[in-house]
Image: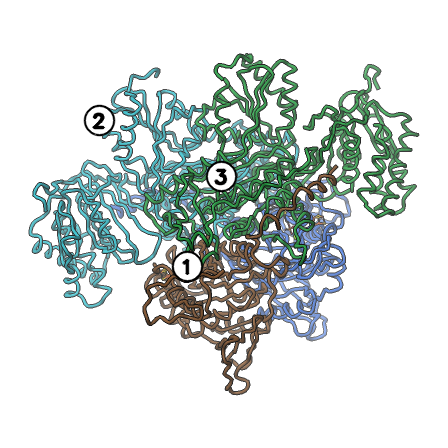
Chain colours: A green, B cyan, C brown, D blue
Amino acid sequence: MSTTIKPLQRTNDFVVKFANVNGSGSASANGLFARAILRMGVPASARNIFPSNIQGLPTWYEVRISGQGWLGRRGGVDLMVAMNPQTWDRDLAEIEPGGYLFYDSTRELPKSRFRDDIFILGIPLTAICNREYTSPRERQLFKNVMYLGALAFLLGIELAVIDQLIADQFASKQKLIDANYKAVRLGYEAARTQVGAPIGLHVERSDAVGDRIFIDGNAAAGLGCVYGGATVCAWYPITPSTSLVESFTDYCKQLRHDPETGRANYAIVQAEDELASIGMVVGAGWNGARAFTATSGPGISLMQEFLGLAYFAEIPSVLFNIQRGGPSTGMPTKTQQSDVLSCAYASHGDTKHVLLFPQDPKESFDFGALSFDLAERLQTPVFVMMDLDIGMNEWLVDPFRWDETRGYDRGKIMTAEMLEAGKDFGRYLDVDGDGIPFRTLPGTHPARGAYFTRGTSRDPYAKYSELGSVYQANMERLLKKFRTAASLVPAPVVHRAQQETNAGILYYGSTSEPMREALSQLEAQNIHLDAMRIRAFPFNDEVYRFIAEHDFVFLVEQNRDAQLKTLLVNEGEIDPSRIVSLLHYDGSTITAKFISREVASRITASNVKPMKKVAS
Amino acid sequence: MSTTIKPLQRTNDFVVKFANVNGSGSASANGLFARAILRMGVPASARNIFPSNIQGLPTWYEVRISGQGWLGRRGGVDLMVAMNPQTWDRDLAEIEPGGYLFYDSTRELPKSRFRDDIFILGIPLTAICNREYTSPRERQLFKNVMYLGALAFLLGIELAVIDQLIADQFASKQKLIDANYKAVRLGYEAARTQVGAPIGLHVERSDAVGDRIFIDGNAAAGLGCVYGGATVCAWYPITPSTSLVESFTDYCKQLRHDPETGRANYAIVQAEDELASIGMVVGAGWNGARAFTATSGPGISLMQEFLGLAYFAEIPSVLFNIQRGGPSTGMPTKTQQSDVLSCAYASHGDTKHVLLFPQDPKESFDFGALSFDLAERLQTPVFVMMDLDIGMNEWLVDPFRWDETRGYDRGKIMTAEMLEAGKDFGRYLDVDGDGIPFRTLPGTHPARGAYFTRGTSRDPYAKYSELGSVYQANMERLLKKFRTAASLVPAPVVHRAQQETNAGILYYGSTSEPMREALSQLEAQNIHLDAMRIRAFPFNDEVYRFIAEHDFVFLVEQNRDAQLKTLLVNEGEIDPSRIVSLLHYDGSTITAKFISREVASRITASNVKPMKKVAS
Amino acid sequence: MTYLLKPKLHHPSLAPNALGYTRRDYEGAISTMCAGCGHDSISAALIQTCYELDMEPHRVAKLSGIGCSSKSPDYFLGNSHGFNTVHGRMPSVLTGANLANRDLLYLGISGDGDSASIGLGQFAHAMRRGVQMVYVVENNGVYGLTKGQFSATADKGSKSKGGVVNEDSAIDLCALALQMGATFVARSFSGDKGQLVPLLKAAFTHGGTAFIDVLSPCVTFNNHAGSTKSYDFVREHNDALNRLDIFFGKDEIVADYAPGSVTDVRQHDGSILRLHKLHDSYTPTDRIHAMRYLEERKALGQIVTGLLYMDATPNTLHDNLNTVEGALGILGDKALCPGQGNLDKINASLR
Amino acid sequence: MTYLLKPKLHHPSLAPNALGYTRRDYEGAISTMCAGCGHDSISAALIQTCYELDMEPHRVAKLSGIGCSSKSPDYFLGNSHGFNTVHGRMPSVLTGANLANRDLLYLGISGDGDSASIGLGQFAHAMRRGVQMVYVVENNGVYGLTKGQFSATADKGSKSKGGVVNEDSAIDLCALALQMGATFVARSFSGDKGQLVPLLKAAFTHGGTAFIDVLSPCVTFNNHAGSTKSYDFVREHNDALNRLDIFFGKDEIVADYAPGSVTDVRQHDGSILRLHKLHDSYTPTDRIHAMRYLEERKALGQIVTGLLYMDATPNTLHDNLNTVEGALGILGDKALCPGQGNLDKINASLR
Ligand SMILES: Cc1ncc(C[n+]2csc(CCOP(=O)(O)OP(=O)(O)O)c2C)c(N)n1
Ligand SMILES: Cc1ncc(C[n+]2csc(CCOP(=O)(O)OP(=O)(O)O)c2C)c(N)n1
Ligand code: SF4
Ligand code: SF4
Ligand SMILES: [Mg+2]
Ligand SMILES: [Mg+2]
């Protein structure tokens, strides 16, 4: 250790990263670690970095502890819990100078395998395990729990908090609880005896968490589907969307069985592929159910033909796209926002689809529920555009709320009574001037209101027609309907800079949390930006106004080709040179550091100083 | 007949439209009619307007005769051959005042069913047929040939020309030839006796056709595939692409059997669907064959997943997309250019694909052949973007030529010799700085050059990698390759206005022929436009320069959403307000009239007069 | 719900059925098939079936893929909702529709190209899931709508109109349906309404996954010599297993057959299927036997028609999912939304 | 083409085969499967097969879909070109590759999810086209890579690790392959290399469409009690039909068996398959019998393994297409381009 390096001293503001092997049971211990921080009232965020593999490959869990409440990924590591020899060198290299390395010191390592600008914390975990446990399974499992105990000592996490978490997790299985208690204490004691004193990174009780909850976006969205009244789910497994359906399934089992008969108020079918899952959703939507699927890029590609049908035949349907690294199989366990175009303009021919961009699990729940109202109101597919970062990581978010006075908006459905009363029914007739026609549900009336749904051109009364004028009028009505959509989808959210500025910044989805932090970092550098979070496509007029109000705007995206910019420029007829793209697409979670660095370099480079607004 | 209306008097400049019933055998007689005009040296173009049905629904054949050589659709009808009672009213309404109606007068019709501003030519075709023929089949077939004879008399088509065409068509089947001769003469005589004299529309021998040929784009593209060295074709039937594969099959049977063994130098497989057909193309392309498929919109949607694989794994493959009316099943027998976006950005994730836009059958042949060179050079899918209008209609075009000195460009293939010589092989290594790596073909060398192809991220040596930096470098190389493509694809074609002008007009594909005429019409109105025909995506820099050179440009497209404009604006960072879209998308063939009217109205409306260029 | 039917102007000879509907109430738009197309005969058989079964037209949902065959639902049951989906993917759409509302009767209409070529996967998976439906393939061995290419049911060695010989093995959709677990499998011929209508009736009342492969010649592209799907060929090689009568509660059951010549099977809804055996050995309740029989006869060049197999007590997808009675689609907010109370508990569990 | 092989540093005990390659020349990258995964045993069997068959590694092209199983081609035959395609669509890619170059040996590796769920259609159509290949499904009844959902080969009534019971009928890929016209159909078990390796050898020398369904337990998600694809279950219910020896021209054929206990079948390439019958009645040349046998044993809860069926003189897709010898992909401009002379004639015919 070079004497010039001082150990990092940080309270409630540091990053701990766990380097593990896939399938070694570390996830549970790591999760307990993050939760323990939260139970101490200190905000934290956690991210899994995992391979496309089941067992044996490297996997990481990165926890950022931030008393100030910055929940985005920070980058860099202050304490590395290096449990995977395969990635030792790489893991070591990531530690900040003055940071800490925690490792299993059972097997001695030559000096050369370490760094001299970091602090080494060796605990002979394997040796202790081998001493304390006999079965290989226990030895493996409790090693993880043991390092949790050691960290409790080193970072000052209250043992009572961990105990309570363990008790909560294993409910009434007292034997398991006791075994875990023991392992925690073994680790704690080992650290106390081997290291002697807590390190410079410290967790201190706080009340900054409030009533927030800790949940991943897929779980939240699955719950949103339950609250949104979804009754049919057809899906095909694909990372990172699978756990959304698992969440829906679990919550349905809990909340959606008829209290009297015990029978299910829902139907979940694992289809044979994504062509079938979207087909089932379209069939169910046509037949009056709130139906959805969850998938990722490859599934979206396979669904293209059906999406065109649903657009043109106007069938309500909801798709959750948990985006991962593309194209092709790409990086299936990494995060991106790169399916924006393939969803917005899905299918051959002229189409436009509604997209929602939740920023976190909370909005995944909200938009998840809302999407069904929109799909039925607009009679069209609605995409909830999440990503792996939101979907598969647990986030600290405000608790879910449900407005009990809110009823489901089932849209324009012509009932038997209306038909009986002699109301004129034309399936594709724009009666209200909003481009949205009425529909009837199959089985409504024995003699009226039946029509033939098809993907071919037809007249307002759903009669087959190949007349160009009839076709064109219908296509124009669909455009009108899309304009109506712009007023129904969630409006953008604006954060005004503290000072008037001629520059703005646009972003969407999981970029939101790092953006909050980046704006504050930039402010500290005296760079002021008005910020707007886009929450849906088609874009609300406010978005265009925001762009018009500023001399130029940045647009942060997690894809290579600036896909949302394409939509903005195209739909809003905006001069592309007024939008400066900041693109992060290597599959890792975007950081505040990345955003503020990119913005700052461009502001300097182009020598543009934030100026007074030209017009307001 | 109101006495104020004069009968139309036109020589080598009029439109004849045949209204028939699908499946009634009229196609052959109608084709003879068009060919007879051409054999008389008079340029003509012909279009089928047909339903998505096999028998019994209305179908039309529209022939424009133009001594001046305008081969686009004109609109309006000067002589209607109304053989379909179902569409009588509609057909009559289309005739220009002073025009002619030819019909089967066997059954008398009340006066009210006619118009009084047109000239009626009734011939009792059915009566004559019933008198002359006994079998119902003959009665139906020869009725068509008979009206051909009648038209010969009325329009002044030389009987000898028709006779020769019949002789050519039926080769040595003398009985058939004689029967057709007879029917032609029956019609001719009937017209002579019933009408008395030729009408005001007249065909006069000319030499304006030259050595041009009359062929549809699908036949031409199929032949282009033969000349381009395609050896594997995998396809699935879909209108309007099917006849492309039929053409390839026929020409292969003629030209591609080994002279010694009689065995096939090609393999054509009808796949079970489009997922399989593109899969086969990808497999064959990977394994060293020049492979293609032909399809239309729904097929393109189904191929999306494979297209992402082919992009990312860099597999040469050629797709002919004969575009039809979308979205969904849409208008399967109508024409559009509405798959531009779904091809250019096909598949989830960030992708960009090469598109070629032939203007007519001649270029369908040329680009068809060229596409294989491009696909192998660029190691990527190449789309030949035709449409129903080009693909399924016969056009008068220059004869096909093949440069005998030209060899196929097989692209960068690392051979056994190169490997043996110790050349470093990295499948995704950018050795030449053009973004294009070398590939080896399976079976090349027992110990070197084998690699594992996949759709997941990997390093330049094709080794699996989930490292963000490795992934990003590869994605950037793909962008570089795409820039290389811009310099290899066919350059745009420019027609400068006769006067300097600040306005330009862009167009592509089948819009070309009507554009030529529209430009001359506009010139006559003193509206001068520089015109540029875009022939490929990615866009050549010349395209951007052209736009920059003009104050504004029109862009004519046959889709609702201005899809090529989206590409232009997006890829070229062009201010969308500088591009004024003229959109024609009702499924009918676009006309010069439409273009010149739209341009003129906008030039007037915006009060923009063609001015001197600002800069040159 | 019941409604007073508005009187229509009917031909007086069109007698109303038990529900007061005439045959015309089961008709649809005018067919655009080629004159003589087998598909039109199947439409007629469906009209007759629904009329004679006293079905409420609006309780039927008819779904199809793309093709001439798949257009036909427009030409019958004009008072039923119809859905012409995409090529080869009707089974999934029908499955979804069925999930949304288990109370309607589902009729899937498809072609051999639609179900055996592009749609083979969806066909097979719908069969194995136990989706309650009547699934009819109008099988002509070609793609009619795209002008006569071979489909996957074209027999090896059969010739196209243009003289090309098919080299791929044929797919026998009945054999496949049996293998996949369909609980009612039959084959018939569009030219034999006497056989087809009772089979359709039995299928509609079956209560499980009912599949009928109906040979339906394409007069325009596959009715020539050398075809094995032409009217002549099918007539000549038809090997009918049995004839069917179906009796409902209201019917009087006539019983004067020679012993051994008929078998009665009671369906789950109480209706009785009476099978008049035309082949001694065949009982349509043995799935393995049915599969073998089909294969053996096929090897002899025969086309086995009739009821091949049925399971009188089928299990359905809804049974497996244990869904509530009635349509999921009409469940109200109360049944669906668990409210803030439950959300509070969930929130608490996430801290 | 022949090349001098550069000497590699080999363990001295690795004996070279007739071509001078050692076992290690047939190995691949280090496996990333879970320890104990059945798929790794199949990789090992493939390595042994190719080594013992004296195959030139670069004459093999190995293709797969997506899944744990489909990753395995990375872990053997590192000197062969490999193609990890998209989920469920390997059959079409392999077909295209085969069309391009008939001279390589094609090995398709897939999973039960890959081939029976998403890929069922492509699987079936590849079988019926007669694509020459060895198609191996590494069948574990679950989606391994996506963490243990049921695949379409999961048996009805079997239980997932989480205790959920599968309600859909299972797809038997061997039965389907037989129905579709595959000319070599076998089933084996990853835990029984003694059975698997000879079957693989026979499949590689078969010369037509060879399909082998290999039960390959997923230790992580489907090896529990209640599963019908666990090591224990498969061992207990394995009903082996026959054992195979394969003799090539160079081999001396040993013939000292009790009469009736063995059958010899000569393959198209002259190799002899010797079947040691374990069941009296079974001869693997009767397709219909094979299908029935499979179904009957399945009904008894048994897993039939061994060579189920083979046609010793298979027809292939290339035979049907009458393509030239050699790879289409390497035909030169001269063979492919008909030149201006022909174009002139065509132009003339179009005037
Ligand atoms: C994705 C897609 N591919 C191709 C087509 C073109 N297509 C329309 S109908 C059809 C075949 C129909 O054959 P079949 O199901 O046997 O019906 P038939 O016309 O013979 O009754 C095809 C290939 C299409 N509509 N969609
Ligand atoms: C289009 C598409 N959908 C879903 C997936 C996700 N996925 C990857 S592997 C797999 C299942 C693999 O199961 P199986 O073929 O049985 O292989 P195993 O892992 O069991 O060996 C799925 C659904 C995908 N890669 N692509
Ligand atoms: S083409 Fe064939 S299947 Fe289609 S309507 Fe005509 S006869 Fe029927
Ligand atoms: S998850 Fe199952 S199939 Fe996949 S590697 Fe592990 S044991 Fe094998
Ligand atoms: Mg058909
Ligand atoms: Mg599996």
- Element on which disc 2 rests: loop
Q: Residue at x 24, y 28 (%)?
A: B522
The location of residue A282, given as percent across then percent down, is 51, 49
The location of residue C271, given as percent across then percent down, is 54, 74
On the question of residue B269 being in view, the answer is no
Indicate the amino acid at tag 3: His
The location of residue D151, given as percent across then percent down, is 64, 54
Indicate the amino acid at tag 1: Ala
Asked if residue B600 lies left or right of residue A357, the reply is: left
Q: Is residue B39 above or below residue B499?
A: below
Asked if residue B225 lies left or right of residue B34, the reply is: right
CA–CA distance in space, label 3 to label 2: 42 Å
Which disc, if any, is residue A447?
1
Which disc, if any, is residue A353?
3
Please name the residue that numbered disc 2 is placed on.
B525
Indicate the amino acid at tag 2: Gln
Q: Residue at x 32, y 70 (%)?
A: C12
> Mark 3 falls within which chain?
A
Q: Is residue A380 above or below residue A549?
A: below
The lab-note entry on whether marks 3 and 2 share a chain reads: no
Asked if residue D17 lies left or right of residue C162, the reply is: right
Q: In this view of the protein, which residue sits in the foreground, C62 or B362?
A: C62
Which disc, if any, is residue B608?
none
Select label 2 or label 1 by which is in front.
1
Q: In this view of the protein, which residue sits in the foreground, D25 or A139?
A: A139
Q: Is residue A594 above or below residue B514?
A: above
Q: Earlier in the sequence, mark 3 or mark 1?
A: 3
- Element on which disc 1 rests: loop
